Amino acid sequence: MSEYPITDSDQEEAPLEPMLLPLNGWHRDQGGRMVEFAGYMMPVQYDVAGGGIMAEHLWTRENAGLFDVSHMGQLLVTGEEDAQTDIEPALEAALPIDLSTLKLGAVRYSLLLDENGGILDDLMVSRWPGGFYIVVNGATKWDDIGTLREYLPDDVTLNHLDDRALLALQGPKAFAALERVAEGEYPLSALTFMKGGRFTLGGVDAWISRSGYTGEDGFEISIPGEAAATVADLLVAQPEVKPIGLGARDSLRLEAGLPLYGHDMDPERGPVEAGLAFGVNKRRRLEGGFPGADRVQRAFAEGTAQKRIGLKLDGRQAAREGAKVFHGEQEVGVVTSGGFSPSLQHPIAMAYVDAAVAADGTALSIEIRGKKLDAIVAAMPFVPNRYHR
Amino acid sequence: MTRYFSQEHEWIEIEGDLGTVGITDYAQGQLGDITFVDLPEAGATFGKGDSVAVVDSVKAASDVYTPVSGAIAEANGALADEPELVNTQAETGGWLFRITLSDASELGALMDEAAYKQYVESL
């Protein structure tokens, strides 16, 4: 047998010895099956009773799953003391975000674009009292740091918080589990979707935001690396919580219609064709002044040749990344992510197709191993979001 | 009846000139939850080492190679509705296909159960 992994193609670009994250030993103790991903050893699933990608996926949809995403880059952008307002124009010149509408503690999705308006990464920006906290993808973080340093003036400081771990607690019971252990100046319920604040978990200082990558209600928790095992132990001790691996993280985000960098977006694609127009805030769309603004504004005005869409397939055979998409005999696009949906029990995929065949309900086909399988363009998310707004 | 194993984690059980092929319990454990199996048509002929079937898991698609040359006699129709049989009964009810051997001497290159067990432990 030979395997074609769909989630860890990044490892080919990282020939160095994989690095170990703070929870490496913790995952092994929990039965984690460790694989190389984005240059780190990460659990793809847990080989225990009730583990495995399918079971972990469904557990997260019904209860609460704990994900270690410490491979992601946590960055802090600060300016000279007492001069926070000065860094806003600098950060706005680097990202297509409108910081004037980002309140203290709020979290917003944005994009790192190149000068051609191609996507270098997607990221989350939070306003902290002393600066802006940014979370970027693991596989791209080193390049992102270089790009941001290039985009930002020298008097703006970019710190890589590489001594911190990042956990995600996701699922309909995530709130109940976390509320039981979180202490702060205000209750955890003060956080609604895309809001964050400071709390302590078992005495450990944590930045918690109500956000995630599964389509469920849930939280992302930034903590010092040396305290990660303490917090992970505290969370999995809650009856609603089990540790969940990268495999289920991928199938959950696919069902939620959330694109994965390096697969569903890359420098060849811009925000408009990627369906990520919301990552370019309205004022910035009008005013420009960010990398690649000309191309992005033109894409808004004129539309794009292709669009990112969702596809539902009949039967059980999944379409994988790279499969060609057809409209009749004509090749119209390519699959960028695909797999069997554990929640829906049929295959789903994301693809880029020509705009003329991108409307919901359009009948297309996908070539898989020489056979063409029927597929229908479907609205995303495939599984309804359950964010706590 | 004699059972042989390949380094690619297929098993083949021989009865006369007919071999029943599946993936090993070790292999199904590595793949995780199996969601679909693409099986060959009866009558199709393959050479030793050809990709004959594909096993899809939530995570990935994996080729299954035939450990011997021959013509497909039958595919396991039960897997269309219950691909998870490959997980739950990898070395019994989760067999993939039956193949009529064209060269029984190819079996000499395969491992017996004890050798395969040792091989897996070495991985």
Image (tube, coloured by chain):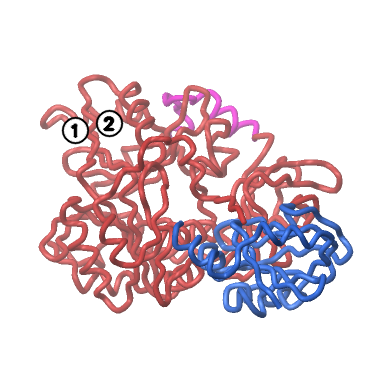
The residue indicated by pointer 1 is: A84
Q: Which residue does the image show at 51% across and 50% down from the upper left?
A: A7
Q: Please tell me whether residue A179 is drawn above or below residue A261 in the rendered image.
A: below
On residue A98, the disc is none
Q: Is residue A312 visible?
A: no
Relative to A205, A275 lies left or right: right
Q: Amino acid at mark 1?
A: Gln
Magenta region: which residues?
Answer: A283-303
**Marked residue chain, label 2:** A
Label 1 secondary element = helix
The residue indicated by pointer 2 is: A88
Crowd class of label 1 (few under 14; some 14 to 19; many from 20; radius 10 Å): some
Label 2 secondary element = helix
In the image, residue A36 lies at what x, y percent?
41, 48
In the image, residue A89 lies at what x, y percent?
30, 27
Which chain has been coloured blue in this picture?
B
Residue A284 magenta: yes
Q: Which residue does the image show at 32% across and 30% down from the upper left?
A: A145
